[in-house]
Amino acid sequence: MATTPLAGTGETAAHPGDYHDAQVAKRNQVVLFLMETTGAFAKPALDHLRWLQARSKTRDRTHYTGWAANRRASARPFMMHWMQRISTAAVRGNARRALNAIRALAFRFS
């Protein structure tokens, strides 16, 4: 069947996707983190991070740096470290997408 983009119908031949190497070759588990464009986590993503934190207590030898790791009141440097980095990546990715859309519109209407 031929693909008809305007009608929204058609099919594409099967091919290895973005996570094929991680799942098949390296046998890793891939977990989807649903997030807001503001960097806020969905509850299942937070639950998975908490599970990773509990699992890391016996295996994690990472020396976390930054304000969260240096505060005595901070009992969770693992969570702070990874939440900050994942949220930053989500916000930056969304900003990059918005800038690309603006450039495309500027080019289209120029």
Image (spheres, grey):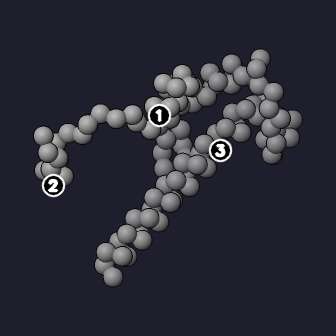
At numbered mark 2, what does the secondary structure look like: helix, strand or loop? loop
Q: Which quadrant would the C terminus be assigned to in this image?
A: bottom left
Q: CA distance from mark 1 to mark 2?
A: 28 Å
Q: Which quadrant would the N terminus be assigned to in this image?
A: top left
Residue 23 seen in the current view: yes
The location of residue 107, given as percent across then percent down, is 36, 76
Q: Which residue is mark 1?
A: 19
User: Looking at the image, which residue is at 34% across and 35% down?
Assistant: 15
Q: Which residue is mark 2?
A: 6
Contact flag, marks 3 and 1 (Cβ < 8 Å): no
> Which of pointers 3 and 1 indicates the residue nearer the eye?
1
The kind of residue tagged 1 is Tyr
Residue 74 seen in the current view: no
At numbered mark 1, what does the secondary structure look like: helix, strand or loop? loop
The kind of residue tagged 2 is Leu
* Nearer-N-terminus badge (1/2): 2
Q: Which residue is mark 3?
A: 85
Q: Is residue 20 left or right of residue 13?
A: right
Most foreground residue, 31 or 5:
5
